[in-house]
Amino acid sequence: MSLTTSSSIAHASPEARRAALLAALDVVEGGPEERFERITRIAREAFGVTGSFLNLAGESVLTIKSQQSDQHFGPTIPLQDTFCGRTLGETGPVVVEDATADTRYADMPMVVDDPNVRFYAGVPLRLGDDEVKVGTLCLVDQVPRTLSDDDLALLEELGVWAERELAAGADEDRLRAVLAGLEPAAVALPGYRIAGMSIPHGVVSGDLHEWHRSGDDLVVTLADVMGKGMSAGLLAANIRGALLARGDDRPDVAVAGLEAQITPDLGRAESFATLFHGRLAPATGRLDFTDAGHGLVLHLRADGSEAVLRSFDLPLGLHPAGLGRTPGSLDLGAGDVLVLVSDGALELWDSTLASLSRLGHLYREAADIEDFLARVRARAAEHDPGDDLTVVVVARDA
């Protein structure tokens, strides 16, 4: 999601613009978040007030995203009944020293009745190129108060912090969009079905999966960079790009070239990566591959038997320079299936290779590949693997 406001939103009502920005940021739902809780905690402690709040204003409802108060409110309140709702039109901070003495606020339910607010100070939270006001960071107290210039400057600085945290959600959305663009495109391969999925442990995954046609053949890859997060994701992206540049080479040639290119990067990052890279000839079902320390490929045969393709080589970044890799091959018969996974799949059960058999059983129970991948997602939702999870399926029709 870009914080650059589109022309359709820019010409909408202020209420609609606020709602559109908040919907795109995806922060309204989901309950408290520590990144906002930290700000309201500091605000309450710094000013010694009875309550501090980070509020998000939709079209007609105010959502209390974070609150530090002895009395819990919300999580939603009709916007018109709030200080925030009545001050949305103000361009800067709003300070109400005694609400009972201010005709703009004296009739509000929260002033007349419980919690009997007297003091209010709020700074607007703005987002987008045209700085749409989407909410407030505010202080309340049950006794009249004043704020010095320094106090107001501190509250404004906390508001800037809150704005940056809100905008960070947009940055993550942009990053997710970039990563989604790295997903392999669907390929048509008569007599075969190919599909996959990846669930990052955080925003960025250290796993990568890729498939594409090279002439009549299918090239398929799955790699897993040590660790999680941004550094692992950057290394995975480098590996992907280096392999795509060698997309028409034999697996052993491609991996050798990849290794020469990527090993220095892995060394500097004190990391390594496991990799399975294969080339399938559809007419015969022969798959030639190089496995660099991965060993997480399950071959489900049409006769009901299964085998795990073990690796005899070390991962990228750990394999001795100049030492050749062990070539591998298999015949994918009619009705056979290959299930390639990252090690996050093992964490769905008992963290051992026995989990691959459990995964194979899940596949045989499924109606089709899409149903199988849906079951894997459901399993991951119930049993968080605590790691990036990637699954690729290559199935030959019976």
Image (cartoon, grey):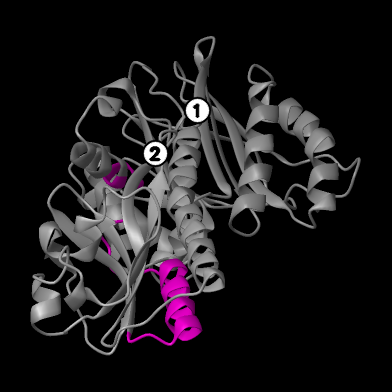
Q: Position of residue 361 (x, y in %)?
A: 29, 56
Secondary structure under the numbered disc 1 in the rendered image:
strand
* Residue closest to the eye, 340 or 76: 76
Query: Is residue 26 a member of the stretch shown in magenta?
Result: yes
Q: Is residue 370 left or right of residue 46?
A: left
- Left or right of residue 63: residue 313: right
For badge 1, the amino acid type reads Trp
62 to the left or right of 151: left
Residue 124 sits in quarter: bottom left
Quadrant for the C terminus in the image = top left
**Depth check: 374 or 14 in front?**
14
Between residues 299 and 363, which one lies in front from this camera angle?
363
Residue 382 x %, y %? 28, 67
Query: What kind of element bears circle 2?
Result: strand
Q: Is residue 70 magenta?
A: no
On screen, 102 above or below 210?
A: below
Q: Which residue is mark 2?
A: 196
- Residue extending furthest toward the right: 322
- Where is residue 300 drawn, in percent x and y? 38, 45
Q: Tell me where residue 30 sits by quadrant.
A: bottom left
In the image, the segment drawn in magenta is 22-50
Q: Residue at x 31, y 21 (%)?
A: 7
Q: Quadrant of the N terminus?
A: top left
Badge 1 is on which residue? 211
Q: CA distance from mark 2 to mark 1?
A: 10 Å
